[in-house]
Image (cartoon, rainbow, N blue to C red):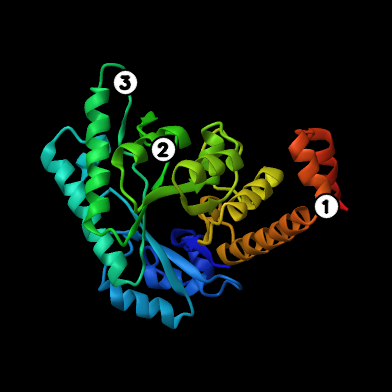
């Protein structure tokens, strides 16, 4: 089982780790701190934020810490013009810059030994009625994604959807719309990253979203966290939606997901100990997977699910969870 984490989480409470630190911790400092987490196997790096040196060198440095690179995630902050769109920017020069930056990110990921690039296109959307030509916006998004997929067909490109933020309306806010885009792009190396808090925020049931994606595309990434479904809270795994998290783990296991479980939580928002927080997340997922194992061996649950008997299903789940 691979467990990966959000690297920026390890900037939380910096002076507890680096008493003499002036400014922000470096990528390698955060990675060194993350390597203290018992059970952690991988890191994801943001591009270009975390990749300030030769990617192959970064991979060796992270490897020396006992970790691997699970994948890269694109960030579109280098040009202020990206605020009104990366792949959907009204200026073709800015669109080209965003696409070319993504290609460089894919090349860097491959040089670092990874074959996964996650695209969170949060800037691609709109804020006002009469702001955009929706057909043109969609066409630009699809063309941009298709081009970066074609750049290296051995690299998996995974779309992480989110209802909004920073734009009022994201162009790909939910599973169904993302699957429509994937259908239009029509590239074999394209899939979806499910972020648990984003799925809740989109008013979706996580396991159903996973099943739908597995039917029409494939789940390439799973970001676990939790929240109250009003925003992207980034809380610890299982803190609010324990049953829904267990159901999601059961569903992705059933559908053959074999990628990393990535923790996209925000201990840095309130100054939590990031090492302890990540260790608790890992232990929580291991306990949940043990519950999934027991559920799979209990014929009562499969029978209840076949009958859509919610009461009997709840009785089994509560018994296996709580004793």
Question: How many discs appear?
Answer: 3
State the SS at label 3. loop
Q: Position of residue 297 (x, y in %)?
A: 78, 57
Report the mark closest to the observer, 3 or 1: 1
Looking at the image, the residue that sits furthest to the left is 93
Work out how far the residue at label 1 is from the one at label 2, CA to CA, in angstroms.
Answer: 34 Å
Few, some or many residues within 10 Å of mark 3 (<14, 14–19, 20+): few
Of pointers 1 and 2, the one earlier in the residue sequence: 2
Which residue is situated farthest in the top direction here? 130
Q: Nearer the viewer, mark 1 or mark 2?
A: 2
Which of disc 1 and disc 3 is earlier in sequence? 3
Q: Quadrant of residue 84?
A: top left
| Disc 1 target residue | 320
Which residue is the extreme one toward the bottom? 64
| In-front residue for pair 213/162 | 213
Is 31 above or below relative to 71? below
Left or right of 289 in this view: 144? left
Which residue does the numbered mark 2 point to in the structure image?
Answer: 179
Q: Residues within 10 Å of mark 1 (few under 14, many from 20)?
A: some
Q: Residue at x 46, y 49 (%)?
A: 218
Residue for badge 3? 128
Residue placed at 52% from the left, 71% from the top?
A: 41
Nearest-to-viewer mark from 3 and 2: 2
Q: Is residue 242 visible?
A: yes
* 306 is higher (above) or lower (below) than 41: above
Q: Position of residue 209 (x, y in %)?
A: 54, 39
- In the image as oriented, which residue stretches furthest toward the right? 323
Nearer to me, 115 or 101: 115
Of callouts 3 and 2, the N-terminal one? 3
């Amino acid at each position: 089982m691979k467990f990966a984490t959000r690297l920026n989480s390890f900037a939380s409470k910096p002076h507890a780790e680096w008493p003499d630190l002036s400014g922000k911790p470096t990528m390698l400092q955060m990675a060194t701190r993350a390597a203290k987490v018992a059970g952690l196997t991988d890191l994801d790096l943001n591009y270009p934020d975390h990749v300030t040196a030769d990617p192959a060198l970064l991979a060796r440095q992270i490897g020396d810490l006992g970790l691997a690179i699970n994948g890269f995630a694109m960030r579109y902050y280098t040009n202020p013009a990206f605020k009104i769109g990366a792949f959907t920017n009204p200026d073709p020069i800015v669109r080209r810059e965003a696409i070319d930056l993504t290609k460089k990110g894919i090349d860097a990921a491959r040089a670092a030994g990874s074959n996964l690039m996650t695209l969170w296109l949060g800037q691609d959307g709109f804020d006002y009625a009469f702001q955009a030509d929706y057909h043109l916006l969609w066409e630009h998004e699809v063309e941009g994604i298709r081009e970066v997929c074609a750049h290296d067909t051995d690299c998996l490109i995974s779309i992480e959807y989110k209802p909004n933020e920073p734009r009022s309306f994201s162009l790909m806010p939910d599973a169904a719309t993302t699957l429509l885009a994937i259908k239009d792009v029509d590239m074999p190396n394209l899939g979806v990253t499910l972020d648990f808090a984003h799925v809740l925020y989109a008013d979706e049931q996580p396991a159903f979203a996973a099943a739908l994606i597995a039917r029409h595309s494939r789940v390439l990434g799973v970001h676990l966290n939790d929240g109250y479904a009003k925003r992207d809270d980034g809380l610890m795994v299982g803190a609010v939606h324990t049953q829904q998290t267990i159901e999601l783990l059961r569903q992705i296991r059933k559908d053959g997901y074999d990628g990393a479980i990535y923790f996209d939580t925000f201990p840095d928002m309130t100054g939590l100990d990031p090492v302890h927080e990540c260790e608790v997340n890992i232990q929580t997922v291991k306990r949940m997977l043990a519950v999934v194992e027991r559920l799979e061996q209990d014929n009562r649950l499969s029978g209840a699910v076949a009958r859509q008997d919610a009461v009997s299903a709840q009785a089994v789940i509560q018994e296996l969870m709580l004793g």
